[in-house]
Amino acid sequence: MHHDNGALGSATFKTAEYRRVKVMKENGFNAIRTSHNPPSKHFLDACDELGMLVMDESFDQWQKPKNPQDYNLYFDNWWEKDIESMVKRDRNHPSIIIWSVGNEIQERADSSGLEIFRKLKNKILDLDKTRPVTQAICSFWDSPGKTWNDTENVFAQMDVDSYNYQWRQYEPDHEKFPERIIIGTESIAMEAFENWQQVEKHAYVIGDFVWTGMDHLGESGIGSTHFDNETVNGLPGWPWFINNSGDISILGFKKPQMFFRDVVWRNSDLEMLVHAPIPFGRKEVISFWGWPDEIKSWNWEGNEETPLKVSVYSRCDEIRLELNGKEIGTKQVSEETKLTAQFDVPYQPGELVAIGSTDGKEISRQTLKTTGAPVQIKITAEQDVLPAGQNDLIYFNIEVLDEFGMLVPNAENKIEFEISGPCKLQAVANENPKDMHSFQQPFVNTFRGRCQLIARLTKMDGEIVIAAKSEGLKSGEVNVLTK
């Protein structure tokens, strides 16, 4: 996880830090690698209290630059002071289980890099001998001429061996170096199944960190899904402003790949998603860190009879798909199919149902219903009553609903806010990675039916009232007491 808190930017409000650790824990994660610098004290406090393991990491560069103005300019004069500052500040946090001193360092396999790692490791061990020390190693995309065999001397210095995007090397490396304790320090969502297979199969593979757990600002569009005429040097350009590779959105909600990971991790028996229609003559381009343009929606007006790709993820043996009570088809699911069954379904509004069975017995089912038009706004505070503390934050989640109270997953409405009581607007946001807008104006567009407002307390007690309005929709309002 990067250091930022979405629309709050790099500010480290205690509320925000606790919230994102809580969100990750609720989604099944039990460890976070900080990238690629020490996190805030509030973040580590939250990990201690909520029960989240941490790989605490210091540097993204040593002497060789990744960009002209990065930390390489200061490394020689500052590495020792910065390591000392990090370890002395953080060593009493029980959540920290590993120290990392580098990420994809260019000189990692050079003689200079081997010597730098030795100095960094020894400095840490002078201050704390209770935890292993590592650095994250990737392929030599940045050092032409070197091969994976050149990593041998690098790993020989480590206590835990950290691999970025190299799950295919785990088994052959274990044959040659059976003493290695391997951890995946970066992986992609599209290989979530393969990485977790390695963890479950081999005791020497102790875990897998996905790039990234939650969306962050910057690295714009590296996790993009777009069409073939929308790229600049292989990635989309402006107005993308979010990385979009997170399993969790910038608002803190599950993204499509998280539903797949729920099945991979056995936290869900079955999940169903629908791929958005691809215009005729166009080709979908999924970046290395991306995921297909799927969504939990059966709202595709204007695409009647167009075949839509429906993916059902499950550890059941068999999946049956029904549309409006009629069977579309039945498919087998297994590890050989990567826990995935796909169907082409001509779109008709109504009710799409996926039923998962094992040994002929129904285990789970999931339904997607076509909703009505947007009618009303629902606004929900994540806490009803707050222990007041000046500068605490309150998160409000806003949804656009139809007349029956169902979230309208394709609703894109401009929501305007009115705020009263002992607070002020701190930020507004949606999950759209290319809807660049001010975070600090009292309005925002919904994306896939929802958006978020974050308020900041200004006094120690009172009643906060937040109203959300949009032309043509019934307004929403919520009251929160502070005490």
Image (spheres, rainbow, N blue to C red):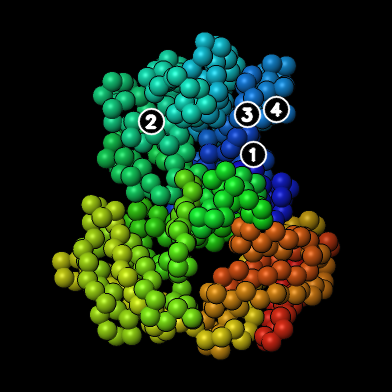
Give the CA separation, mark 4 to mark 2: 32 Å
Does the image show residue 299?
yes
Graded by Cα atoms within 10 Å as few (under 14), some (14 to 19) or many (20 or more), the crowding at tag 3 reads some
| Residue type indicated by callout 1 | Pro
Q: Earlier in the sequence, mark 1 or mark 4?
A: 1
Q: Residue 428 location, x and y as percent?
A: 72, 63
Name the outermost residue toward the left: 359
Look at 59% across and 47% down and name the residue there: 232
Determine the image quadrant of residue 74.
Answer: top right
Graded by Cα atoms within 10 Å as few (under 14), some (14 to 19) or many (20 or more), the crowding at tag 2 reads many
Q: Check the picture and name the quadrant holding the N terminus.
A: top right
Q: Residue 242 location, x and y as percent?
A: 62, 52
Q: Earlier in the sequence, mark 2 or mark 1?
A: 1
Q: Residue 458 location, x and y as percent?
A: 83, 61
SS at circle 2: strand
Graded by Cα atoms within 10 Å as few (under 14), some (14 to 19) or many (20 or more), the crowding at tag 1 reads many
Find disc 3 in the rendering and name its residue: 66
SS at circle 4: loop
Q: Nearer the viewer, residue 64 or 42?
A: 64
